[in-house]
Image (cartoon, grey):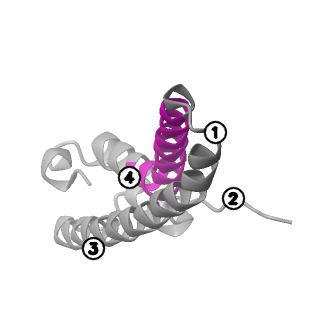
Amino acid sequence: MATIQYRTLNSELKRAIVNKQIPEDQLREIARKMKNEKKSMIKRLNIVMIIVAVLFIVMGIPAVRNVGDPKFAGMMATMCIGSIVVIYAIIYFLMVGILNSQFNGAVKKYYPEIAGELKV
């Protein structure tokens, strides 16, 4: 059975932020690592979405050729683009958005003096 995996903030890290047990310089380092990880994850996600788009196009060309109707081709293109955008948004939210919002929210609440510079 397929599962949807998503990323959340480590409970130990969240507890340490809530209890203000992490020094500011270490928190800056954690934020820097999270930013780098976010960039690499977005890069991988973009590559996967390009592959999906190419597969949609390759699979859609024979269907459009067989029908030959320009309205059908437009409808197929719209459906493919819409599907790709929705899939991208959902995966981005699950893999990047939840983790970032949890980290940013915790830092904003418990370290308000440096929250602006640590925003991931």
Left or right, 95 with reference to 20: right
On the image, the x and y values in percent for residue 68 come to 57, 38
Q: Quadrant of the C terminus?
A: bottom left
Residue bounds of the magenta highlight:
73-100
Look at 20% across and 55% down and name the residue there. 118
Q: Nearer the viewer, mark 2 or mark 1?
A: 1
Left or right, 35 with reference to 60: left
Dot 1 and dot 4 residues touching (CB under 8 Å): no
The amino acid type, in three-letter code, at marker 2 is Ile
Task: Say whether residue 116 is magenta.
Answer: no
Is disc 4 placed on a helix, strand or loop? helix
On the image, the x and y values in percent for residue 85 come to 46, 42
Question: Which residue is nearer to you in this view: 88 or 16?
Answer: 88
Look at 23% across and 68% down and name the residue there. 23
Q: CA distance from mark 2 to mark 4?
A: 18 Å
Q: Nearer the viewer, mark 1 or mark 4?
A: 1
| Residue placed under numbered mark 1 in the picture | 67
Of pointers 2 and 3, the one earlier in the residue sequence: 2
Q: CA distance from mark 3 to mark 1?
A: 51 Å
Q: Quadrant of the N terminus?
A: bottom right
| Residue placed under numbered mark 3 in the picture | 33
The amino acid type, in three-letter code, at marker 3 is Lys
Of pointers 3 and 4, the one earlier in the residue sequence: 3
The amino acid type, in three-letter code, at marker 1 is Val
Q: Which mark is residue 100?
A: 4
Dot 2 crowding, Cα within 10 Å, few <14, some 14–19, many 20+: few
Look at 69% across and 59% down and name the residue there. 4
The amino acid type, in three-letter code, at marker 4 is Asn
Q: CA distance from mark 2 to mark 1?
A: 36 Å
Is disc 2 placed on a helix, strand or loop? loop
